[in-house]
Image: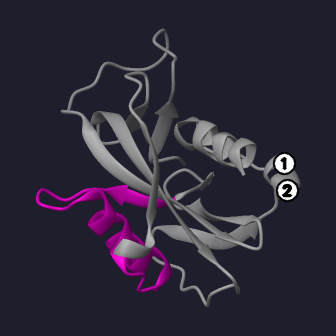
Amino acid sequence: MSYVTFYRGDPKNAPKTTMPAHLGANAIITCRGRLLLERRRDSGTWGLIGGGCKKYETGREAIAREAYEELGLRIPKDRFTKLAVYDDPGRIAAYRDGSVWRMVIVVYAVDFPEEPTLRISSESKELRFFSKEEIKSIEIPVTHSDIVADWFVNR
């Protein structure tokens, strides 16, 4: 059973937000042209690494922390390159506890020349690098699918 449902540009079906806008940081982590995704425990979908920024954290600090928490990788915050901000108001996450958040996502990138050793966290079922072709056959949350598509178009 899914703990979260994601919406993007779907005002007819998306619930009204119950919480203030949520600032998140996600990472495009690549190795040899392949993109790292996690199979999320909360929805079973394949998403980008990342999460919410804490109260006094910058986006780069947040993504460096999330990379350690979710992957076991200590990546210096300055190694991440800021790519884009996704701030459309229809980017919504509705959780089973009744909280509904508008998501503003800052996307950062880091590339590895060799595939790093990864540790699966309690938030993930699986971690895997995907090619552009492989991504076509997996389910990605709508709140990440446009980010992933933009990355493949712009590389």
- Position of 148 relative to 64 (above/below): above
**How far is the residue under mark 1 from the one under mark 2?**
6 Å
- Position of 92 relative to 28 (above/below): above
- Measured from the top left, where is residue 92 in percent x and y? 40, 31
Q: Which residues are magenta?
A: 49-77
Residue 137 is labelled as 1
Residue 134 is labelled as 2
Give neighbour class at mark 1: few <14, some 14-19, many 20+ (Cα, 10 Å). few
The residue most toward the left is 56
Q: Nearer the viewer, residue 52 or 74?
A: 74
Q: Are marks 1 and 2 in contact (CB under 8 Å)?
A: yes
Residue 102 visible in the snapshot:
yes
Which residue occupies 37% across, 20% down? 15
Q: Nearer the viewer, residue 124 or 50?
A: 50
Give neighbour class at mark 2: few <14, some 14-19, many 20+ (Cα, 10 Å). few
Residue 53, image quadrant = bottom left
Q: Secondary structure at mark 1?
A: loop
Which residue occupies 19% across, 59% down? 54
Magenta stretch holds residue 73:
yes
What type is the residue that disc 2 sits on? Glu
Which residue occupies 73% across, 48% down? 152
- Measured from the top left, where is residue 21 in percent x and y? 24, 34
Magenta stretch holds residue 36:
no
- Measured from the top left, where is residue 112 in percent x and y? 63, 79
- Position of 28 relative to 143 (above/below): below
